[in-house]
């Protein structure tokens, strides 16, 4: 079962929606439960990430494939999984950034590290990147 909670000023968590309230009523009183938290993804922030990648793609000459650039940025930023090829060679694969595979907290970290990667690998100014990405967003 999944319940969306909101933390109040008093530090108490309360159900965010009526459906969450109904599901919370099913939880037994005085029983310990372990809750893992994640922050739901923000679609606008997701679009901003793609605007960042598109902006870089339009202002570089190394890549002629946007998808390869996006995946390489993710890998270079440390968000990858290792698999092994037919001959045992190590292959890095970019982590999926789908909404079901990455929450807002991890995605925010990815975004910031991709900006760092762009600054480091493409020699663009951080402030210019942040200022100009809004043109593509």
Image: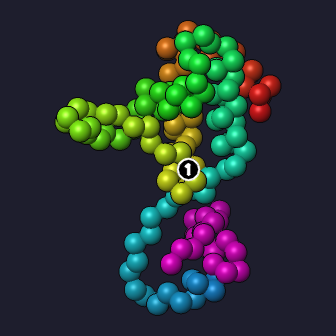
Q: How many marks?
A: 1
Residue 100 colored in magenta in the image: no
Q: Where in the figure is residue 105, as x and y percent of width and height?
A: 53, 47
Residue 83 seen from this side: yes
Q: Where in the figure is residue 69, as x and y percent of width and height?
A: 54, 25
Q: Where in the figure is residue 48, as x and y percent of width and height?
A: 69, 36
Residue 13 colored in magenta in the image: yes
Q: Secondary structure at mark 1?
A: loop
**Nearer to us in this view, 116 or 90:** 90
The magenta segment: 1-20
Q: Where in the figure is residue 6, as x and y percent of width and height?
A: 63, 66
Q: Is residue 134 above or below residue 26?
A: above
**Nearer to us in this view, 54 or 110:** 54
Quarter occupied by the C terminus? top right
Q: Quadrant of residue 2?
A: bottom right
Residue 105 seen from this side: no
Structure colour scheme: rainbow
Neighbour tally class for label 1: few under 14, some 14-19, many 20 plus, Cα within 10 Å: few
Q: Quadrant of residue 95?
A: top left
Q: Is residue 132 left or right of residue 116?
A: right
Q: Residue at x 19, y 36 (%)?
A: 88
Q: Is residue 14 left or right of residue 100?
A: right
Q: Residue at x 56, y 50 (%)?
A: 98
Q: Residue at x 60, y 57 (%)?
A: 40
Q: Residue furthest front?
A: 86
Q: Which residue is mark 1?
A: 98
Q: Residue furthest left?
A: 88
Q: Residue at x 50, y 32 (%)?
A: 71
């Amino acid at each position: 079962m999944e319940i969306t909670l909101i933390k109040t000023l008093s530090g108490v968590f309360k159900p965010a929606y009526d459906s969450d309230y109904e599901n919370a009523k099913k939880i037994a009183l005085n029983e310990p439960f372990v809750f893992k938290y994640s922050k739901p993804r923000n679609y606008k922030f997701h679009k901003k990430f793609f605007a960042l990648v598109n902006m870089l793609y339009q202002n570089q000459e190394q890549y002629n494939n946007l998808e390869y650039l996006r995946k390489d940025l993710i890998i270079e930023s440390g968000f990858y999984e290792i698999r092994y090829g037919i001959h045992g060679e190590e292959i890095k694969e970019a982590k999926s950034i789908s909404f079901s595979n990455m929450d807002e907290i991890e995605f925010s970290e990815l975004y910031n590290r991709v900006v760092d990667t762009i600054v480091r690998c493409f020699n663009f100014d951080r402030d210019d990147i942040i200022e100009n990405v809004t043109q593509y967003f």
